[in-house]
Image (cartoon, rainbow, N blue to C red):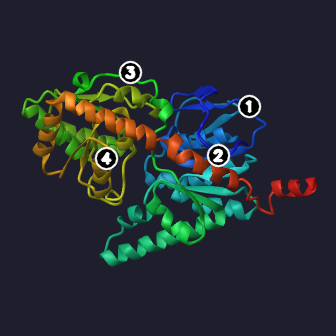
Amino acid sequence: MSEGGSAPAEGRIVQTESWLIRVPPGIGSHSPLLVIPTVHPRGDRRVVRCAQVALDAGFRVHFLWLGEGVSSVDPAVGETLFPRPKNALARISMVKGIARQAAEHEATLWHIHDFYFLAAAKKRRKRGGPPVLYDVHEYYATYYSAKVPGPRFLRESVATAIEAYQVRSAKALGAANVATDDMARTFRAAGVRVSVSPNYPLLEQYSDLPSVPFADRRWTVLHTGTLSRPYGTRLLIELIARSASRGLPFEFQVLERYPSAGHEDDFRGMLDLQGPLPNLEMLPARPAHDVPKLLANAGFGLSLLQAEGQNELAVASKSYEYTIAGLVNVVTDRVAQKRFADSYAVPVSGHEDDVDGMLDQMMALADNPEETARRLASTATEARRELTWEMAVQPGLSQIMLESAQDVSPHSKQYRRRNRQR
């Protein structure tokens, strides 16, 4: 396996209808195996980016995740597909089955991406399974405790218990990879080996984008994120409808990305109640590696997080992507994403009740395309230096993968083989 560092550019491309990944020279069936069991959907951008780091570090990978289509049987990048569940409860119930199939692979390392997977991973580890890297995508303690009915002190107690459980679990498993520095604090305090991996884009996916002047794309407004109420579907429809009623020249493009069939029904129901929106174009969902092509032709990108759960603490992946691709970041005044937009992007921000105020800010930037283009070029250049997966994430994540792979259980086949070789 190679040392940690930035990813090499060379390699062959392995691609399915849901994901694209680069396999460096020399990686194949002889390479140590990193198994990725998850109840995330096939092609999840963070899961794929982490897998790219593993390949560049010298592992081959095998995904076990939820989706349809033809599974990859490439010797360096394989996958096992499971049917998509109808709801969250069905998703959780699939963990044991996925973990059983993951255990059939003789892995050097597991990389799990779900809070739900902690119990199954610990059980496997106790039985002599490989070391496990636990990936923390979200502020799980805040997210899950917010769903608990009752007074605030009860939710805070639940959050404390959830945080303690996942920290103890990560310590037993081997290591953690978290999305923010703030998440890392409790893991570090408990002596857990941890790397920090913000959801920055892969720069290599943005290197060949066409350069379209802002003046030619200033009236296109894009929403690439998940369509659900916590992510601002009601505000999205209000912005589109109000822009149309004011006769503004903005055209809105919205990717059809729904967490579940129920979320799709809810969004379409809101659209039906609103009535025809001539300035709205719904675009078919597409894999993450095809999104940069859409960004190249848009002037504004929307991230409309609502005041729910962990949203005050979160910066959505799409905000980083908008900035690197040279779009204006249109955000609600959630604390973390507004702070990011004000510091690193050309921002439009406002309260969800001030639709006209947000549209006025957008018009002011669109009506001054030369100055807006200058500011966007400056922020995009800075983001490409600092806010990329290759620069900010890969070295630390690569190192922790390589270190974790050495944490072999004394009950495992690898441990017995090592002792025989001695």
Amino acid, disc 2: Gly
Residue density around tag 2, few if under 14, some if 14–19, many if 20 or more, within 10 Å: many
- The spot of residue 393 in percent (x, y) is 53, 47
Which quadrant is the N terminus positioned in?
A: top right
Name the residue beneath numbered marker 2: 4
Name the residue beneath numbered marker 1: 26
4 or 2: tag closer to the N-terminus: 2
The residue at the point 20 percent across, 32 percent down is 371
Which quadrant is the C terminus positioned in?
A: bottom right
The residue at the point 45 percent across, 24 percent down is 208
Asked whether disc 2 touches disc 3, contact meaning CB atoms under 8 Å apart, the reply is no
Name the residue beneath numbered marker 4: 228
Amino acid, disc 3: Pro
Amino acid, disc 4: Ser
Name the residue beneath numbered marker 3: 210
- Residue 301, can we see it? yes
Q: Nearer the viewer, residue 171 or 208?
A: 208
Q: Secondary structure at mark 3?
A: loop
The residue at the point 41 percent across, 76 percent down is 157
